[in-house]
Image: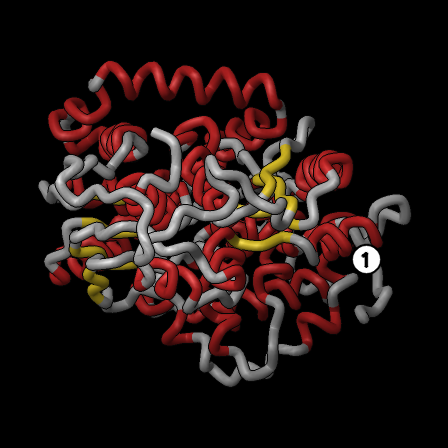
Amino acid sequence: MTTTTQRPGPAAVLAAEEERLLACVHCGFCLTACPTYTRLGDEADSPRGRLYLMRAVAEGRLDAGAEAFATHIDRCLGCRACETVCPAGVQYGFLLERARAAAREAGAQSGGRAAAWLLRVFASAGATRAAMAAGRWLRATGLPRVLARRLPARLARVRFGLAMLAASAPGLRRMGDAGRTGASASSPRPAGGPEGRVEGPRVAVLAGCVQEGLFSRVNRATVAVLEANGCAVVRAPGQRCCGALHAHGGDLDRARALARANVDAFERSGAEWIIVNAAGCGAAMKEYGELLAGEPAYAERARALAGRVRDVAEFLVELGPVRGAALPVRVTYDAPCHLHHAQRITRAPLELLAAIPELELVPLPGADECCGGAGIYGLLHPELGGRILADKVAAVKATGAEVVATPNPGCMMQIGAGLALAGEATAVVHPIELLAESYRRAGLVRE
């Protein structure tokens, strides 16, 4: 429970979270886990330093619109690695969103005009569809991949943005049908296949904004794999963007509006479970209870819905996935921050990949450290984001893997862009794409 301490103006949102702020004992365990502190060495760019700044605003010692506050809060990746190592259980991600809301109300927009524009786009279903259609059209021309390598260094942000768009193209090249098998004892056709099956869990899949707009193949693979495992996949008309980008940017009003729309849509679907294949979206939806806690008409419904949200790997491992055909490929796995640190799902994606016959899973050093993506962080902070990404690219390269699997669209684009600009041919895919390909080869999903 938090106190009801209130201060006028932007500080009120942080003043109301006094108990959460006081949970930090300044032990310093978070320092070595923080990607910005380890690169910059500035206490104000560490989790405990930022919490100190938040307390200063909450207590009226610092203005929420002060440059020092806005700069260090904006520089945070929001990776929440500090939460994993914090012995006091500080809810840093929750507090960061409130800090950004305070800065936003004071006139300091996190991420600047580019971020503000994106938040407006993703708040509108029509604008999202138009923006994603334009992105797909540009990607299809092949220009992003070409220009990303040829534009001058002074246009670094443009180059990287184009490289990210190019990286959203399919990364898994079908490796022929040499290894394809029919259903057999070692790779049985699920009872829910063409022969018919007693209906299993009734699930709905979050389509998402970027995921459906640029990675619709991942959504199709998700549905195919769920159906192959006996699930009845139902539609949820009226669902919207999950609101994660808005919450992370401090635009809590829009985040709540989107959350309310999703609570309504998924309730109407009648689904027992809501399956999410994007780490950031899953983390956001699992926190709908807190986001809508102050709204009597939605608070309890949001908590109930959040309790039925499952990451696709988490859900499939709980079910015990049907075995597919051999997929002889060397893969390394990178853990998205909002899966590993926010949702604390660390083993399920690895277990899912390990269940694919003949897939060689190679450990990735620093797999649990942020790739520097964090939404559009890599574009807004190209130097610092680039330093963090360079370490990730070097780690991937050292594995010798043909494919890097990571279950979040932002991470796929960030790592894919970094690899492409470094001249690496390593493919970047969602783990569910590999499982779907294994099922395709076993004849468990339709072509």
Q: Quadrant of the C terminus?
A: top left
Depicted 428 relative to depicted 194: above or below: below
Using the image, determine if residue 324 lies above or below residue 33.
above
Q: Is residue 12 left or right of residue 369?
A: right
**Residue located farthest toward the right when viewing the structure as drawn:** 296
Q: Quadrant of residue 253?
A: top right
User: Which residue occupies the foreground of this view, 5 or 185?
Assistant: 185
Residue 297: name its quadrant: top right
Q: Is residue 335 left or right of residue 233?
A: left
Number of numbered discs on residues: 1
Residue 15 image point, x, y percent: 76, 62
Q: Secondary structure at mark 1?
A: loop
Q: Give the answer, above or below, for where 129 lies relative to 302.
A: above
Q: Which residue is mark 1?
A: 7
In the rendered image, residue 28, in percent from the top left (x then y), is placed at 46, 81
Of 166 and 229, which appears nearest the observer? Answer: 229
Residue pictured at 77% horizontal, 35% vertical: 268
Which percent across, then down, holds residue 229? 49, 49
Where residue 310 appears, as percent x and y from the top left, is 58, 54
Quarter of the image for the N terminus: give it.
bottom right
Residue name at image x 50 percent, y 45 percent? 226
